[in-house]
Image: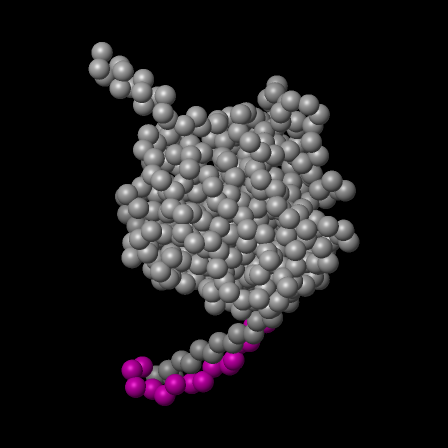
Amino acid sequence: MLVSRALALVAAQAPIVPTGSHLPPPPAFTVRPAQGPIRLDGSLDDPGWRGTTEIPLDWEWTPGDNTTPPVRSVCRITYDANSLYIGCRAFDPHPAEIRARYFSRDDIDRLILDDHFNIVVDPFNDQRRSFEFRVNALGGQADALLSTAEGFEDWSWDAIWGSAGRIDDLGYTIEIAIPFKSLRFPRAAGVQTWGFILERSYPRSVRHRIQSGPRDRNNTCLLCEANKVTGFSGIAPGRNIEVDPAVTASRTDLRTQLPDGALAQGAVDPAFGVDFRWGISPNLTLNATGNPDFSQVEADVAQLDVNTRFALFFPEKRPFFLEGADLFNTPIQAVFTRTVADPDAGLKLSGKVGSSSASAIGVFAARDATTTLLFPSNRGSVGGSLAQEATRPWDASGAISGARRSWVGSTRGGSAPATPTRSPGWTCSTSSTRPPACGCSTSAHAPSIPIRRRRAPASPWRRSPVAPPAWS
C-alpha cells in the first residue's frame, strides 16, 4: 500500500513530457548580418556578435525524452558577405569537469567522448542532405556530409573552415567560421531560409545530448526536426572552380656489376596529373581527373588478413570518388570504387536536377590501368590483378549511374506546408503503400534506408537547471 501511494505521488509530481505528434514545432529564428568584425579566437566579445539573436538549447533528447537539460547552453548565428559564423556558450557549474582533448581531425571516436557542439546545416532546407560540423571545447574539428535518405554519414568529406574554443570560469565557448564557398546553397536574390540543428554533448555520468528544438524519437527524418533560420540575403556560393595540378618524377639507378659496381644513372620518368572540380550550379557538380596523384591521401589502417573468410574492406578516401558518394550507396553494396585501383582518367557528374531540386543523379566513368579481380568462394575469397587496362565499372559503357526522386508530404492536420517540420516515422521503400514521408526517396538502383535511432527510456531523475549570468 505504501509503495503504491509513493508511486502515485511521484507520478503526480513528474512533469508531463510531450511526445510524438504532441511535440511543439522547432522554434524559428531570424538572423541578420554581423554589425562588426569577428575574430576567430574562441571569445564571443567581438563587435560582430552584438545584437545577434540568441538561440537557446532547451531540449534534452537523450537520456531524457525532451526534458529540461541539466545545464544551460545558448548559440548565436550571423554572417557577412564571405562567411557564416556560429558562436556558442556552454555554461557549466563545474568547469574543471569539462572533457576536452586535442585529437586528429575527424577522429569521431575520440570527439564524442569530449564536451562539444554539433552544428548541422541544411542550406537547401529540403530535409534531404546537410553539412555537419563538430567542435570540442578546445576547437578540435570534425566534419561530415549527412544524407538522411540513405542513412549516410560521410566523415571522409573535408571542408575548408575555421574553429576555436576556450574554457573559462563559466564553462566554455566555441566559434565557427564557414566560408560560403565551402557550402552549397541556392543562388537567390531574395531572403533565404536554412535548416539548423544546434546540439551540445555534455558527457558526465551519462552523455546528455541537448538540442535547440524537440526531437521525436518516432521520426526517422532527422532534418525535419531542424530549426528554421531565415534572414540570409546578399550571399553567393561562388564559382566553385578548383584545379589541382600534380607533377611527380622518379628515377631508377642500377649497379653495373654486383656487389661493388658503380651505379648507372637511369632516366627521369616524369608524370603529370590534374584534378578538376566545377560547381555547374549550387546543385550540380562536375569532377574530372587525369592521372591523379593520390600520394597525399590518408593511408589505410592495417588489417589482419590471416584466417579470414571474406575479402578485406578498406574505406574510400580519394577525393574524386568521395564527391556525391551517397548517390551510389545501396543496402547491399553494389558499387565499390576501391576496385578502381590506378585510374588513368575519370569523369563524374553528381547533384540535383530540376526546378524543385527533388531529383538527384550520379554518373561516373573511369579508365583503370589495372584490372582487379576478386573470386569469391564458400570458404574464402581470392584476389588478383592483371597488368592491363580496364574501363570501370564493368558494364559495356564503362559508366555507372544512379537516380533518386524525393517527395515531401503533409505531416499534421490541415493542408500540407511548403516546408514540413515533421513527418511520420515510416520506412522509405519503393513498394510502400503508405504516402511518402518527409525526406523519403526512391532510387533507381535500390530502396533507400533512413537513419534509425535507438529508443532510450526517459530518465526519472531531474536536476535543477543552472541559471548563470546572461550572455556576456
Q: Which stretch is magenta?
A: 258-274
265 or 32: which is nearer to us?
A: 32
Q: Position of residue 344 (x, y in %)?
A: 59, 61
Q: Which residue ends up furthest to the bottom in the rendered image?
A: 262
Q: Position of residue 7 (x, y in %)?
A: 29, 19
Q: Is residue 178 left or right of residue 14?
A: right
Occupied quadrant, residue 421: top right
Q: Is residue 325 above or below residue 224?
A: below
Q: Position of residue 354 (x, y in %)?
A: 75, 42
Q: Position of residue 88 (x, y in %)?
A: 48, 55
Q: Is residue 61 visible?
A: yes
Q: Residue at x 31, y 53 (%)?
A: 94
Colour scheme of this structure image? one colour
95 or 181: which is nearer to us?
A: 95
Occupied quadrant, residue 160: bottom right
The magenta stretch spans residue 468: no
Q: Is residue 31 left or right of residue 203?
A: right
The magenta stretch spans residue 262: yes
Q: Is residue 364 left or right of residue 257?
A: right
Q: Residue at x 42, y 81 (%)?
A: 253
